[in-house]
Image: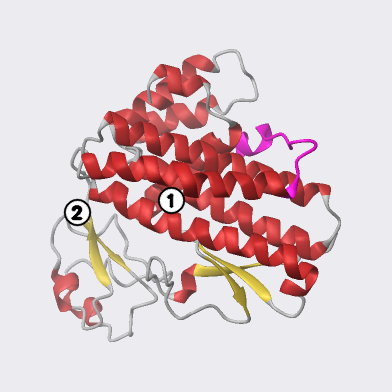
Amino acid sequence: MHAARTISLCTKDCVCLFVCPTGATDTENGQIDFTKCLDGCRLCVDACPSHAIYLVPATYPVPQEKSEAVRKSLLALANSKADQERLARSLAEASDDPVFRQLMDAVATSNHILAEDCYREAGYILPQSEVVRSWLRSLLSEHEKDEDFPSDAVTTLLEKL
Amino acid sequence: MEEDDMRQLSAEELGALCSNLQKACTKQLRSEEAALFAVLASYYDKQRTTKADCDYNALLDAINKDLSEGFKDASKAAEDANDRGAKRALVWGEKASKLLQALMMRYEKQGSALLENTNVWVCEICGFVYVGDTPPSVCPICKVPSFKIHPIQKEAV
């Protein structure tokens, strides 16, 4: 567990610089240097007057199980929202009215976010989870002969997650 | 995902699944993994095809169908399973969908005047849409502060 800073909350009291035993909190980019930060130390987290520092876990628990009915109905909704995103983008592309295009962009963007949320609650919430990993593995075998598919990216993801 | 569900996923669905996981990696401050999910998302972005002969009413009908069926079915399943996380997504999603429906109906009446001297905004967290000069200070659906509510630009064609 390492400390991280929410820069928009930080009121620059700099107490974290005083308490950090390794200098990890003092960096030119406003983020905490993970390579120097001591696992689970949390001195800066407790000292920060603006509550701008928190701990990022290194490992996460297995996500809550989803019932088959919930999973299926959320995947169906995600399908519908993704289809609406496609419809809105198609309508935007077919039009040369800037206002209509702007409106359809907004509808497409909103639907994309709604589809993302459906996947999250259908069980695809944690990148490290077995459902995500097995999906990534299935992509690799499915696209074995597809040269355009970013197999390297997927392989690296499976190694890192 | 079950093998059977897999084959039916469109480029848009896979794109949303990838961008969701990309955001999750960003929240965990795993920027390398987030970038890799972004690579995968952009692959699916390129696989998108536009739908020919689509019309405005088909889009409005699809939103209406979610409101009359999709959200009801899913809410029943979430209620039966006492899945409060799913309920949360459905409460937010239904509210955002009602606003999309209202927005499209307003456009039918007002046409380009709807956005003539103003802007349209979308909340990056819940999909809330808003027409006006400045968005509310907190999102009325998910209560996130307004710095996560973004304007959709009018592009030159």
Q: Which mark is residue B23?
A: 1
Magenta region includes residue B103: no
Residue B8 screen position, x and y as percent: 53, 23
A74, A116: nearer the viewer: A74
Residue B154 screen position, x and y as percent: 75, 67
State which quadrant residue B104 falls in.
bottom right
Is B21 drawn above or below residue B113 in the view shown?
above
State which quadrant residue A43 falls in.
bottom left
Determine whether the residue tagged by mark 2 lies in a helix, strand or loop. loop
Is A56 drawn above or below residue A69 in the view shown?
below
The amino acid pointed to by label 2 is Met
The segment highlighted magenta reads B42-56
Give the quadrant of the C terminus of chain B. Answer: bottom right
Marks 2 and 1: same chain? no
Q: Chain of mark 2?
A: A
Residue A160 screen position, x and y as percent: 35, 35
Colour scheme in use: secondary structure
Give the quadrant of the N terminus of chain B. Answer: top left
Residue A35 screen position, x and y as percent: 29, 54
Cα gap from disc 2 to disc 1, whole angstroms: 20 Å
Q: Which mark is residue A1?
A: 2
Count residues near mark 1 (Cα–Cα under 10 Å), then give few for <14, some for 14-19, many for 20+.
many
Seen at 84% across and 60% down, the residue is A97
Drawn side of residue B121 relative to residue A9, left or right: right
B71, A47: nearer the viewer: B71
Q: Chain of mark 1?
A: B
Is A17 drawn above or below residue A70 in the view shown?
below
Drawn side of residue A18 relative to residue B10, left or right: left
